[in-house]
Image: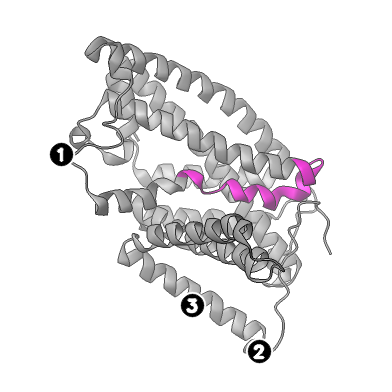
Amino acid sequence: MNIFPLPFAIWAVFFAGLFTLMNIRGIRASARTNAMLTVGMSLVIVAFFSSAARYIIRSHGLGGLLSLQPFYDPKTFSWPLVSTGTSIAVLTYMGFDTVSTLSEEVENPRRNVLLATVLVCLFAGVMGCVEVYAGQLVMPDYWNFPNQETAFVTAAGRAGGLLMFHLMNFTLLVATIGSSAGAQAGAVRLLYAMGRDNVIPRRFFGYLHPKHRTPTLNAWLTGAVALFGALTISYQSGIELVNFGAFIAFMSVNLAALTRYYIRAESRGVKEVAVNLLPPLLGFFVCLYIWWSLRNSAKLAGSCWLLAGLGYAAWKTCLFRRRLVLPDLRPDGQHS
């Protein structure tokens, strides 16, 4: 950590415990905390944009605010590096779908879950692109970053000095609290839904705390797994493992859309080809390309975990002779 130089293991234990306790207290406590954090972080981002604009104009003039170099630099461009970087950068879009796992906690879930999912994805994508664009303009010599994992903090420091460096450091620290607690909440609720439907052992995963009415055992389990991962694997490896499963899911969604709206459609004219055939095919192959760009170690580890899941499903269904009942996560919040 750039703020308090404590051993990484201490920070990992602290944050894993903090996120777990936030989720044990319930979704309302997490929502109030995230609302306050969002306001503070938004102010810091506005201050960064102001500092970055002043730095760029002072160094390159007003025209320096518009440049293609962040998108394409012929001196350093490499397709393999772009592919690997893309497989990491898409983590920005991961997690918005976990909003659906909180449908039972939402007022008017049929409307609000859909709206929240789309808006979170759109806002995160636009803001992420603009922030990285500004950071690249401020510090195009990316090879001089002392630490690749805190590169944006270094660019913020060059734009706004030592104060902005520490302020952005603290903001990223705070952002970790909001995003990680939300990610854990989604995992906790998904495990609970699966346990409630006895897809996985109900006694453990379907348990609710009598006071907080939260799946406390799932919260402790996910906290322990997160802590173990933080202490044993690198940041990039963790991202790639997440993306391994995410892109398989995205490819499956595209194939499902293709099957439902084109292959099984009554009409397959020109309109259906343009609307129901080409978009899911394009989405599938884009996701496949990014998935294939993951490092072999991530694909090996992800494949082992996938095979373990298939093995469990085979045992649960007597070698797939029985139907596996999946958890009901409909946006109306009702359980069948």
SS at badge 2: loop
**Compared to 168, does 53 lie above or below?**
above
- Please state if 276 lies on the left or on the right of 331 as rendered: left
Foreground residue among 311 and 247: 247
For label 1, the SS is loop
**Disc 1 marks which residue?**
75
Disc 3/disc 2 C-alpha distance (Å): 16 Å
Q: Provide the secondary structure element on which disc 3 rests.
A: helix
Q: Using residue 12 as the reference point, say whether residue 104 is left or right of it.
A: right
Quadrant where the C terminus lies? bottom right
Asked whether residue 220 is drawn in magenta, I would say no
Please state the horizontal and vertical placement of residue 64, each as a whole percent of the image: 28, 18
Residue furthest to the front in view is: 270
Looking at the image, can residue 192 be seen? yes
* Magenta region, residue range: 92-111
Q: Which residue is mark 3?
A: 307
> What is the x, y in percent for residue 24?
67, 47
Residue type, label 1: Lys
